[in-house]
Each structure stands twice: as C-alpha cells, then as structure tokens.
Image (cartoon, rainbow, N blue to C red):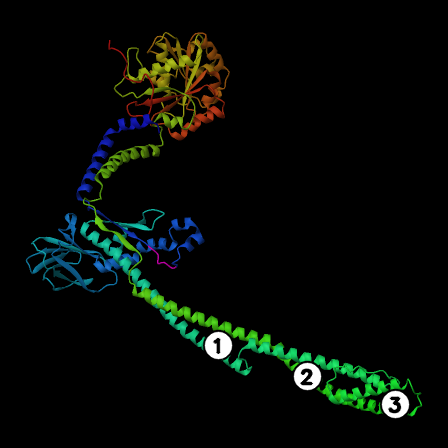
Amino acid sequence: MNFKSILLQFKTYWYLFAISLVLCIGLAYVYNTYATKQYLISSSLLLQQEPNNPDASSTYANGGVSSVLNINELIKNEGDVLRSRNLIKEVVQNLHLNIKLFLNSGFLASEIYSAAPFNVEILHTKVDSLRRREYVIDVINNNTVHIVNEDENIDRSVKFGEQINLPQYNIRIVRRSGVPIYQQTYSTQIASEDDAISDIIKNYDAEFTDKGTTTMALTLYYPNSEKGELILQNLMNQYLKDNIEHKKNVIDSTINFINSRLAVVGDELTNVEKKYQDYRSSNNITDIEEQAKVLVGNASENDNKYQQQQIQLSIINDLKERLNDPENVQVIPSSLNIQNASFAASLSQYNELLNQRAKQKLSYTETNPVIVNLDQQIEVVRHNLLQSIDSYKNEMELSSSGINKQTNVLSNSIRSVPGKQRAIMNYSRQQELKQQLYVYLLQKREETSMAKAADMPYSRIIDNAKSTKEPAKPIKSIIYIMSFFLGLIIPFGMVNTKKMMESKISSEDDIEKQTNVTIIGKIGHQSSREKSRADVFSRSQVTESLRTLRTKLRNILIDGQPNVIMITSSINGEGKTFLTRNLGNTLAMTGKKVVLIELDLRKPKLSQTLGINNEDFGFSNYVLENLDTKSLIKPSLFHANCFVITSGPVVANASELLLNDKLSHMIEDLKKTFDYIIIDSSPVGLVSDALIIQKHVDITIYVCRHNYTDKAQIEIINEIRTKDNVDNLYLVINDVNFSKSGYFGYGYGIGYGTER
C-alpha cells in the first residue's frame, strides 16, 4: 500500500478511526485506573564456586588468562537453580504465599501485609488439589468477623481463633497483636501452592548482569512493595541456606565414604605387612642387599681357591709325567708351588742326588758302583716322590670337588637374589601405596571435618531486596501510546480485511495488480437525480470525466482521419452502452460527426436507451436484405452531430452476421461521412462477437465497473491481449465515487471555474 491510499482510507472512514481511538484510549484510561499496581523489587547476588584448588596459578596454566574471564559452567547452573520451581516452592511454604489478604474486595481490593489486623491459617486440607477461592471478611467488632463466599454458600459469623469448616479445608482467623482493627471489609484469597508458585514465576526473573561476571540480578513485580521485598529477600536467604545444607550433605557423605575406605585400606595394609613378614622369615632375609654382597664375596673366594687347586693339579700332573720317565735325569725346579712338606723334602733329596750323580759322572762311568749306588738311591727317592704326588693329587681332587659344590650352592643363591629382590620390592611397593593412601584419607577426613565446621556460604548477597517508590506497572504512557496505535490499527485492519475479502474491484490498485493494460478513463458515479447524458453546460463528475476521456482519446488516435472505436466489457451491466452513448455525445460536442453502431445483436440496449425502435431496420436487415448503408443511419435525438445505426431484429446467428464482409464495407462507407465510428459490442466475457469486430477497429475500450466487475474477470483482459493479440486495448473504469474510492487523477471534481 502506498501513502496516498492510506490517507484516503483515513479520509473515507474517518468516523471508524475516531470511534476506535475514543474506545481504545477510554479502555486504556480504565485499565490504568483500575489495574493492579505492580512494584519492581530488585536485588543482586554474587555467585562463587567452592575453591577446589588453592593454587591460583594452575588456573592460568590449564586454561590461560581467558579462562578466568569465562563464567564457570557450574556457576551458570546456579542461575537455573535461582529460577527453579523448587526454590520458589520453599519460599511459598515459608511465607504461606498461597494465602493473600486484601483490603476491600473485587476490583477495589488491594493486597495488604503488615497492616493486616489478622492472619488466615489453614489447619487441615481435605482435598489433594485446592481450587482458588476468595472469601469476603467483614469485621463486626474486636472479637467477631463475618465470612462470605457465594460459590461455597458460606455466610456465617465466627470469632477470632475459631475453627471454620470449609469444603476444601479448615481454617481459622487469628488476630494480630499490636495492629489496630477497624470495622471494614477485608478479603482473603486461598489458592494451591502450585498456583502461588506460578504467580511468582510469571513476575520473577534472575539473570547475570554481564557475560563476564557471576553477579545475578533478581527482579520481582509484586502489588505490595513490603511483601515483595520480603519474598525476594527470603528467596535469596533460602538459596544460601540450601547451599549450606547441600554442602553439609556432601561433606557428610564424603566423611562416611572416607571412613569406610579407611577401614578397607587399613585391613589391606595389615595384610600386606603380614605377607611381607612371612616371606622374609621363610627366606631368612634380614637385609637382602648385604646378604647379596656376602654371597658374591664367598663365591669369588671359592672360585679363587678352585683356580689355585686346578693350577696345583696341573703342576702335579706335569711333574708326575716327568718322574715316570726314568731316562729323565733333569733337575726338577724347587720353585714349584706344591704345598706338601713330605713332597718338598723328597723333591729336595731327589734334586740333590741328581746333582751328585752329575758330578760323579764326570769321574766315573755308568757301571761304576758309585754311579750305580746313586742310581738306586735316585730310583727310591723317585718312587717316593710318585707316591707323594699321588697322595697329594687325591687330596687336591677331593678339595676341588668340595669347593666346586660349595661354589654351585653360592651361584644358585646368587641367582635367586633378583627374584627375592623383586618380591621384596613388590611387597614394599604395596605397603608404601597402602600407607600413602591411608595417610591421604586421614588428611582428607580432617580437611572435610574442618570444612563442615565452617557453615558460611561461598555466595553472598550484594544488594538486599529493595522496591521502587512508585508502581512500575502498568506504565501509563506506554499503555496510552499502545492504545492510540491500536485505535488506528483496528479500523485500518477492518477496512483492509474487508477489502481483501471483496471479490469486486474497488480501487485502481485492484486492476493494476492484475494487468498492465493502460487505464485511460475513470467515469464518475451518476446519481438517479442527475441527467442520464452529458450536457455541454454540465460540470458534473460524469461530464468532466467524459471530457477527460475525450482528450486522452484524441491523443491516442490519429487526428485528421476517421477513427473506429469499439466498446466492450466482461458482462452485462458494466456500462458499455452508457459509455457508448455519452462518449458519442461528448465527441459530437466538439463539432465532430459521430455515428453509434449497435452491434450487440444478441441483447441490444443502445436503441432502447435512446428511445429508438430497432425492429424496423438495422444491421441485421443490412446484411440479410442487402440494404444501403445510408438507409440505416438514424438521428440520435440528443445532438445534431450524433447518429445511430441500430442492431435490427434479434437473430440467432449473430456471429455469422458479424463474420460477413458487409460489416467491413459498412465501416468503410461510414468513414467517408463520419469522424468517429463508435461500436457498442457484446460482452467479451460471455460471447466472442467483440473479437470478430476487433479487427475492424482502431481502438478497443474495455469497460470495468466499480464494485460490480469481479476481480477474476480482469484475467479476461490479459487473455485478450496475449492470446488474441489485441494490442490496441485500453481500460475505462465506470461508476467511480471519487470521494470514497482509491482512484486518483485530474478533472474529476465538480467543475473548475465560475458558474455562468
């Protein structure tokens, strides 16, 4: 919609807008006057998480500096806790918010709290779900009140403190000390806890003040500022109390777990130590490291002894081999390391005899008795040496065997040392692990016990609950502004909704949205009191609009030659005959010769409107009886320059008559005499006669009627232009009331100039 159409709606339906504005602003006044006033109560709460790690540097090491700026996920969850239904339920139960007291009743009731002279208490509930009920309480005197409820047929007088049996519960009205009581009307409203919780939730909110902080801003709208402050303050205190209780429950659970684990770990530690002790006892282990060193030293010493004995045996075997050879007379070295006293003496004697024989050999021969005697002595000593060697050899072999066995025993013991060390390390590791775990649990139990002793919450209240001095709701200025715009929107919506639901064209936009065919004329509405035809001296809307159409046609048509104009429409009643007659009259006023041809052969109306008989002769006679064109022309009776050719008698084969070549001959004959030839054809939406005539005309005028032509029929215009290739097509809108419709243009007023 454009701005002009909106202004036109304001102008046309100004009375609707005026009534709507008065009603809406009046309702806004009533609402601002009698609506329940709401005060804004606000407070703030700092949420802090329990510190788990005292080393602040670990925070930077794990998440960087940016992690400190982000609200912890656990802190975010606390925001949900502050908005939770369970927390508000605790507040409702603490303050009995399902019971409200009012001064007066009905629309004039206003909630009171500290000024209430009595309290209402529920003694016993009889049903599972309470229905909201309001009881009017009239104070009769200092001891008696009168309670009324029409829904439950309650109408009785009771004393303060007396039990009142009601269908849903039993209540009593208790007098408050220190508060004066007057003989006036009070009322109380009793609802279920769920309803009270819902009432609080609708007017309560808790949000973080900033993304980078953990401060929560709590707001509550409530009719009584004092009670609202109490509710919000109690909510924060209850939240902190629940935090402490939750912390204590967690600590108690932790301590119980630690005690159970201490018992289990203590038994495991005792079992490991006992197994460790049994293993050391069974393996004769005192100090495995020192024992291993001793074993290695003994093994080394035995190995040295064994090597020395093997050397002795090697020497003995070599010596024995030399002594077994009688021909060997070489001296045996006395430096041989043979640790045997008899052998050493025999060896010394043997070497001495060999030296004597060698000396005597220089003086005697082999057969000399001295040499023979020495040989005999040498043989005896050699024999003794062999016996000593055999005896020493056996002794050495026995000793080597014993040393070898002892060495094997030591080697086996050494080889078992790593296994024993591994077992000891395993026992030591288990013992150390269990011991560290036991000490850790003891430490945690002490820390948890100390934390339990500290009953201060980590979160804290920054600002206590505080109410605004004036009611925050309703905001009168906003209510009035909204009512003002609502007063404009309602009639605007009604008018446009009605317009959208209309099936008839009611404005120029309705046509332009569906077709791009040019609108060259808008004929004004003609009342029944006005003349039925245009007059040269008339300055009515119809006459002025016809003159404007005449001017536009002269701009479209070729000047200086005869022009053929066909006028058609979608259906009957749209004003094509009216336009044919008045357009012809308007053109004749300019001194041009005009002829009107009535080619609506099926339902002719032009001749009837002009008061001319069409039964004597007309177009149908012209085609069927071969009449002359001039014989068809009749005067119009309303202007000397305007003439008429009627349709003639109605025939059944109208289309065939129009298809006859005589139509073109007649038009050519008329062009020689007349400046304008205007054809009144049949409605193109009903029959195809107009499409037959269209090829003989210079311009086709399609008539639509305001609030008469259906919007769907505009599609016929598009089909004529596209499918039937009619290029010289223009639109004229008939019966337009310019004071109420969405049509714009020039020349449609009541005449411009001075009356003459």
Circle 2 residue: 403
Q: Nearer the viewer, mark 3 or mark 2?
A: 3
The span shown in magenta is 48-52
The residue beneath circle 3 is 375
Q: Amino acid at mark 2?
A: Ile
Rendering coords of residue 37 (x, y %): 19, 46
Dot 2, crowdedness within 10 Å: few (<14), some or many (≥20)?
many
Along the horizontal axis of the image, is 414 left or right of 502? right
Whichever of labels 3 and 2 marks the residue nearer the N terminus, that label is 3
**For residue 470, side relative to residue 649 (left or right):** left
- Report, in whole angstroms, how far the alpha carbon at label 3 lies from the one at label 1: 81 Å
Q: Nearer the viewer, residue 209 or 499?
A: 209
Which one is earlier in the sequence, the residue at label 1 or at label 2?
1
Q: In the rendered structure, which amino acid carries the disc numbered 1?
A: Val
SS under mark 1: helix
Give the x, y percent position of residue 431. 48, 74
The quadrant of the image that shows the C terminus is top left
Tell me the tag on residue 45. none
Mark 3 falls on what kind of element? Answer: helix
Q: Residues within 10 Å of mark 3 (few under 14, many from 20)?
A: some
Q: Looking at this view, is 216 or 268 the one in front?
A: 268
Q: Nearer the viewer, residue 321 or 466?
A: 321
- The residue pinned by badge 1 equals 272
Nearest to the eye among marks 1 and 2: give it: 2
Q: Nearer the viewer, residue 195 or 498?
A: 195
Q: Amino acid at mark 3?
A: Asp
Q: Is residue 582 magenta?
A: no
